[in-house]
Image: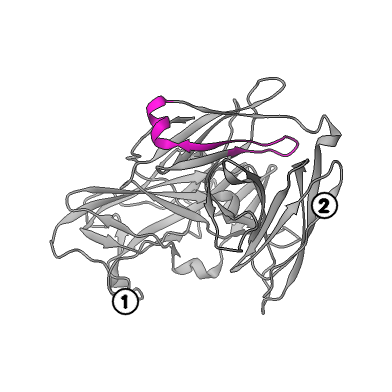
């Protein structure tokens, strides 16, 4: 695994989401420490790649930072960059998030701000594209067909994201907005006809070093790189007592998709990660305990090898069933490992239709998985604040193991 340690001094990346970085003390204001000094904030955007879409276009109107006080007062918000700052103003632009995969950054803006701690920012999604070449301001292309991406009315006042940051006096503070297209663009309900934006994003700050985990996913038989394989960087952490039969929860920190040569790149912060690759019709492979500091020094890359399991029908089966839910969520398929703790092999979204008043809906799911042999899987369904965990799930060849979930309180 090659962790090219880089302090990502980048500038911006397109953001399509939930930007919320408010200001520090006393109910969401900013704390400048009384120094009267200023620093510079730079924003950039990247995308956790999606294998579901050929393109995801989003139009960004502007970005604003909260200067303190009542957030309903427009005078307490400053546009980035400030219109009279002498810096070229941010011009509305329609971005293709798929161009920002595997660590590519897109400039969003920079501005001078009073030094201090901030906790709030907001991003405005446009309703008109930046030019006539685009059929909509926000849309996706799937299997060659264009679908308008509908933005819920609640985001008209700006998309918010909770993430504190500090602007140091006479210093440059860089924030990288990492947008997950796979989780943020959802098909509504069983019909799947409406494409909705449900922002899922995390903010990386360059106050700490940022690393790239790089490598290749290859076919076990041919030795050639595999295209379109999801690769994740995960952390397995002890869960609350009794929450998970395995005793561990899994946090997926970033996702990549292999390119035409089977190569991938994961953007992560410092730490130790489990790197996992899985693709339907193949077995999964993983590497435990990838230490960013050690890899940065050695320059090692992480190669993962997947075995085709469809050629041998006895090597795969299915987990399927129904989920009762009133909110969107996720079903995670996990495998215990003595060294890693537990890894997430793959996951599926839970997407419900919006109805008023909210009512329970029954959704079906099916997931192909390698046979578990003498081992087992742990299947975790989460929706809103409700989580259900089923342990000891075995997968038998060419059959379906049924696991149902009721996520309604």
Query: Between 342 and 386, which is closer to the camera in this rendering?
Result: 342
Q: Residue at x 44, y 48 (%)?
A: 14
Q: Nearer the viewer, residue 313 or 267?
A: 313
Tell me where the magenta segment starts and ends, as one range. 276-299
Indicate the position of residue 204 as horizontal and vertical percent values.
Answer: 40, 49
Residue 152, horizontal then vertical, whole percent: 56, 66
Using the image as rendered, state which of residue 130 and residue 301 is in the foreground: 301
Residue 128 position in % (x across, y down): 50, 57
- Outermost residue toward the top in this view: 222
The answer to whether one can see residue 145 in this image is yes
Q: Which residue is mark 2?
A: 401
276 relative to 157, above or below: above
Mark closest to the chain's N terminus, 2 or 1: 1
Label 1 secondary element: loop
Q: In the image, is residue 206 above or below residue 238?
A: above
The C terminus - image quarter: bottom right
Q: Residue at x 70, y 20 (%)?
A: 222
Residue 334 is left or right of residue 31, and the answer is: right
Disc 2 residue crowd, few under 14, some 14–19, many 20+, Cα 10 Å: some
The answer to if 351 sits in the magenta stretch is no
Q: Quadrant of residue 121?
A: bottom left
* Location of mark 1 (residue): 70
Residue at point 51%, 70% (across, down): 154
């Amino acid at each position: 695994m090659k962790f090219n340690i880089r302090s990502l001094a980048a500038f911006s990346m397109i953001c399509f989401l939930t930007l919320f970085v408010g200001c520090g003390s006393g109910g969401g204001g900013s704390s400048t420490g009384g120094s009267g000094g200023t620093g510079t904030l730079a924003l950039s955007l990247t995308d956790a790649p999606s294998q579901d879409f050929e393109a995801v276009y989003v139009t960004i109107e502007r970005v604003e930072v909260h200067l303190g006080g009542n957030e309903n007062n427009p005078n307490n918000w400053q546009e980035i960059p400030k219109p009279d700052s002498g810096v070229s103003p941010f011009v509305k632009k329609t971005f293709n998030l798929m161009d920002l995969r595997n660590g590519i950054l897109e400039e969003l803006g920079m501005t001078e701000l009073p030094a201090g701690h901030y906790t709030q920012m907001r991003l405005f999604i446009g309703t008109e594209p930046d030019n006539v070449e685009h059929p909509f301001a926000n849309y996706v292309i799937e299997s060659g067909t264009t679908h308008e991406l509908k933005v819920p009315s609640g985001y008209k006042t700006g998309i918010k994201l909770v993430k504190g940051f500090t602007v140091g006096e006479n210093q440059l503070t860089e924030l990288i907005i990492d947008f997950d297209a796979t989780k943020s663009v959802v098909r509504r309900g069983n019909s799947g006809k409406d494409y909705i934006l449900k922002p899922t994003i995390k903010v990386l700050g360059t106050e700490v070093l940022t690393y790239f985990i790089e490598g290749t996913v290859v076919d076990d038989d041919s030795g050639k790189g595999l295209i379109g394989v999801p690769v994740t960087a995960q952390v397995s952490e002890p869960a609350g007592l009794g929450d998970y039969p395995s005793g561990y929860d899994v946090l997926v920190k970033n996702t990549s998709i292999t390119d035409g040569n089977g190569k991938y790149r994961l953007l992560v912060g410092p730490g130790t990660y489990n790197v996992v690759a899985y693709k339907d019709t193949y077995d999964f492979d993983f590497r435990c305990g990838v230490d960013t500091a050690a890899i940065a020094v050695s320059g090692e890359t992480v190669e993962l090898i997947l075995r085709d399991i469809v050629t041998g029908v006895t090597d795969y089966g299915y987990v399927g069933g129904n989920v009762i839910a009133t909110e969107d969520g996720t079903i995670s398929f996990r495998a215990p490992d003595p060294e890693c703790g537990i890894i997430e092999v793959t996951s599926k979204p839970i997407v419900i239709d919006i109805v008023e008043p909210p009512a329970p809906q029954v959704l079906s799911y099916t997931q192909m998985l390698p046979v578990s042999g003498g081992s087992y899987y742990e299947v975790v369904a989460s929706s809103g604040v409700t989580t259900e965990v089923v342990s000891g799930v075995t997968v038998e060849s060419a059959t379906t193991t049924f696991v149902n979930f009721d996520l309604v309180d």
